[in-house]
Amino acid sequence: MLSRLLVILLVPILLLTSSGVDSQPALAILNEDSRPSGPASFGLNSHLATRYPDPSTMATPAAHVAELGVPWVREDLHWHRVEPRPDVWDWTFTDAALRELLSRDIEVLGVLGPSVGWATPFPGDTPNDVSFYAPDPDLFIEYVRAVVNRYHLYIHYWEIWNEPDNPYFWKPQPDPHAYADLLMRTSAAIKAIDPQAQVLIGGFNPFDTTFVQDVISAGAWDSFDIIAIHPYVDPYGPEEGNITNSVRGVRALAHRFGSKPIWITELGWASGPGDRDPVGVTDEQAQANFLVRSLLLLWNAGVERSFWYTLKDDPGNPYGLFRFGTGRADFSQPKPVFTAFQTLNRAVVGATFLEHRDLFALQMLVDFEQAAGWRRTSQPNGSLRANAELVNSGQSSAQLIYNFSTAQNDYVVFERDKPLLLDGEPHALGVWVYGDGGAIALKVWLRDAEGELLQFVLGEVGPPGWHFLAAPIGGAVEPGNRIEGRGNGRLDFPARFAALVVDDVNDRFKGRGTIYVDDLTAINGQEAYNLRLQRGEEALDILWSPPGVQVALDTRGASGMLMDRDGATSQLSAKDGFMTVDLGPEPIYLWHQR
């Protein structure tokens, strides 16, 4: 029986059906094409071998990692640490860190790189310190062979470099062909020592896959087994930042070249001012909430394993589970995010996924039962027409044909003859899409009360198969997405839907293809998220609502156990087959009888 999650304290909600309005609230299952690929598996960027200062007391930070209940860590095996001078090897820190982690049954993802100063052509590098300049590839392979020979009995997963698409980490500038060559050679060296080893491409920015496509074009696709991405969206929260959309674009890439698991090897929010958030929008409580919500949303989106960044704050970059305190050896000040991570890991261990439910009210804007009411603007790059062969619902969808022939910004805009009024103040807009695997994104133009025309990116269309693309529309848009008018760069209501846009993901893409869209929808109402898991005979519902709402959850039991984000528990009684729960931005866990 499909369980029901009912809103109690909300303004009236409308469910649009074929007859108009139903008396029951809407239950929308969004992005139902993606599901977890296996049990929840959340890890941590530990950095023991590179940031903890005392190898003789390495058990101290390792014990804190173990307290979290994480089954995995991502650990750097920096070249400058193990070979500070040519042919001079020092395994003191790496041996100490790995010994303490492995003795606690924690699996290790090893990161190989970056350079050491003496092995780059850049004369300004400190010889025995870390360098982010591209290394001499022959010397790099010697370092890789030494590390893998020493640890291959214990480490079976290797990530090659960190963010090779980032100008900070590959100097003087990212070079996809040089990285592809290094990746292919490194992968071959690893598998010559351990044929069963799994190789990860260096974690990259999934919101722009141009660099990775160039790496693939250079012949490196078969040289890695797992796709590693770093989907940072801070200071936006995971829902407002549409973090799960990062997975869709990468999955579309994999569809074109071959299926591979997706791992997130870095993800995080700072709890104050930092590199990506100079103002410090996120505080310690929000950081703890974002950890739980983001890891769960990405697991639901099909990510096999995710690693939080990081164990301990850096000066000026408070991404860690512990405050910096008096220095790198000070673990006396855990932040709320530590307890939140610990509670999450304890809650999901041994549990299996059942379903993901989002509670929203939906306003159908366009059902595409006919193609009338649209006009293509001046770009001669495509067409829109009705299609009765491939539909998500009803009798027809819209067939969008695109033909992008230049290595410039190709796109095509389909405007409404009469813009459509959005009821109320919806927090998101979405559409069902049947993709073709091309590097194509779908966007919408909305006209607001100030006359501004703003663009919102729904996401990359993805591979064949119907899936729902949605994007929040409540926040400020970047200057490049302000199409017309001068205002505050935010959508002021009342607002209207003005146009649907098909755009190339990167300007160098050339190609033609066909995608289908159906059921353009405004998403109203308060946000309420629910992942339902099962452990034994018990159901585990994990719930949260960024704006706050009260819900009633159906149950067969007389009571349930409620656990808050930080692990405190209480009993919750049922009445007439429902348990009433107040939700907010802090996720809660509810065990009860299904």
Image: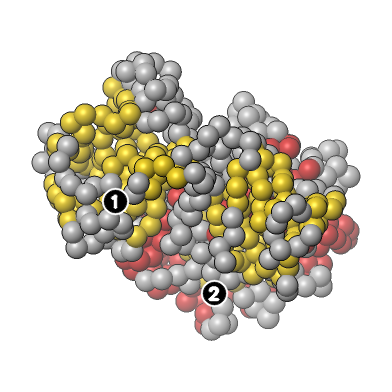
Residue at mark 2: 198
Direction from residue 515 to residue 214 in the image, left or right: right
Q: Earlier in the sequence, mark 1 or mark 2?
A: 2
Q: Amino acid at mark 2?
A: Gln
Q: Quadrant of the C terminus?
A: bottom right
User: Could you tell me if residue 289 is visible in this image?
Assistant: no
What numbered label is drawn on residue 518? Answer: 1
Q: Pointer 1: residues within 10 angstroms few (<14), some, or many (20+)? A: many
Residue at the image point whose x is 54% and y is 74% from the top: 198
Instruction: Residue 73: give x, y in percent of width and height.
Output: 69, 62
Choose between 537 and 188: the one closer to the eye.
537
Q: Amino acid at mark 1?
A: Asp
Choose between 549 and 378: the one closer to the eye.
549
Which quarter of the figure has residue 275?
top right
Choose between 236 and 326: the one closer to the eye.
236
Q: Pointer 2: residues within 10 angstroms few (<14), some, or many (20+)? A: some
Direction from residue 424 to residue 323 in the image, left or right: right
Which element type, helix, strand or loop, lies under badge 2?
strand
* Rendered view: 218 above or below 379: below
